[in-house]
Image: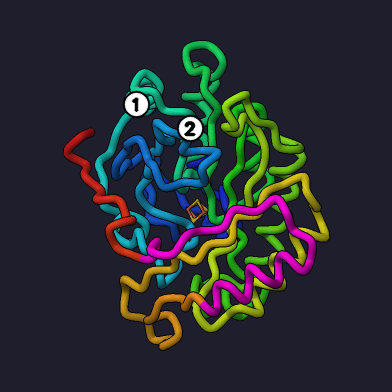
Amino acid sequence: MELLKHCMLCPRKCGVNRYETVGACGATNQIRLAYYHLHQWEEPVLSGEKGSGTIFFSHCNLKCIYCQNKKISIDGYGKIISNKKLGEIMLKLQEEGAHNINLVTPTHYVPNIASVLRKTKDKTLTIPVVYNTSSYESIGTLMMMNRLVDIYLADLRYFDDQLGVNYSGCKDYFENATMAIDEMYRQVGSCEFDESGLMKKGLIVRVLILPGHLDDSKKIIKYLYQTYGDDIFISIMNQYTPVNHCLYENLNRKLTEKEYDEVIQYALELGVTNAFIQEEGTQEESFIPHFDKSIL
Ligand code: SF4
């Protein structure tokens, strides 16, 4: 794959030859996978009753210091698999009853994934494809997924770029992420659901509230609502779980119920109605998948 010989797939623009070395994400030219399963804890329109067919890719191009999936995103846990095997896993999840195929952190493997989906999408693979991303994306890379992705499940992590610098080592998060979300919206448009309420296409943007940064989350929600109104869903998440000890003390605690309520109240006052909110008790490590490459 030529694109991987001078990798510019994401805004890090490393320009490395991934057949010989790795860039900031740590990924080589081959897919490394950590785990796949029917996941029950995504938004209800994705998990439904049987679960979302979730495929966890190893490595990450954003590498947030507080990542709850550090084992795979930063440490690179996983097993190298062929593109063909990835296609087989998608079909296996479909056979097991998955409501969709949920690609978690796929950015650095887009050429490989697009090649698999071009052969299977709407042929043998008939369930929706979900692209689950930090949104630190380049437009050209997302365009490779045009018509191959039905649902974008995108984070918008920081409004203030200083938070991106401190927590993810990038100084241009908001500009890149918002341009990427615009491209996602251009591709999939307004949300559509089937008769049982499962999402068939559309855009969900997740706002993970970080302890001590309620104002940043409010600015993100305001931006999303003013930009997209009710055409998208906003998923307001309280599930921040401190699993890595961070230099920033605020990241070493959970979000309080009072803090979460304050952000929800703000969203309601803005007029947001298309939103998902989380119940109490989602801040446990038991909600983090036990990655197991031995199933691959
Ligand atoms: S995908 Fe990885 S190697 Fe390519 S530009 Fe992004 S961080 Fe660098």
Residues shaded magenta: 258-283
Q: How far apart are marks 2 and 1 (CA)?
A: 12 Å
Residue lying at 40% horizontally and 61% vertically, measured from the top left: 282
Q: Nearer the viewer, mark 2 or mark 1?
A: 1
Closer to the camera in the image, 122 or 236: 236
Q: Which mark is residue 7?
A: none
Query: Which one is nearer the viewer's eye here, 39 or 75?
Result: 39
Residue type at tag 1:
Ile
Element carrying mark 2: helix
Q: Viewed as shown, does residue 156 lie left or right of 16? A: right
Q: Which amino acid does label 2 sit on?
A: Ile
Residue to which mark 2 is pinned? 113
Closer to the camera in the image, 226 or 26: 226
Q: Which residue lies furthest to the top in this view?
A: 123
Q: Does the stretch in magenta take in 266?
A: yes
Q: Is residue 273 magenta?
A: yes
Q: Which residue is drawn at 69% across and 67% down?
A: 220
Q: Name the residue under label 1.
A: 89
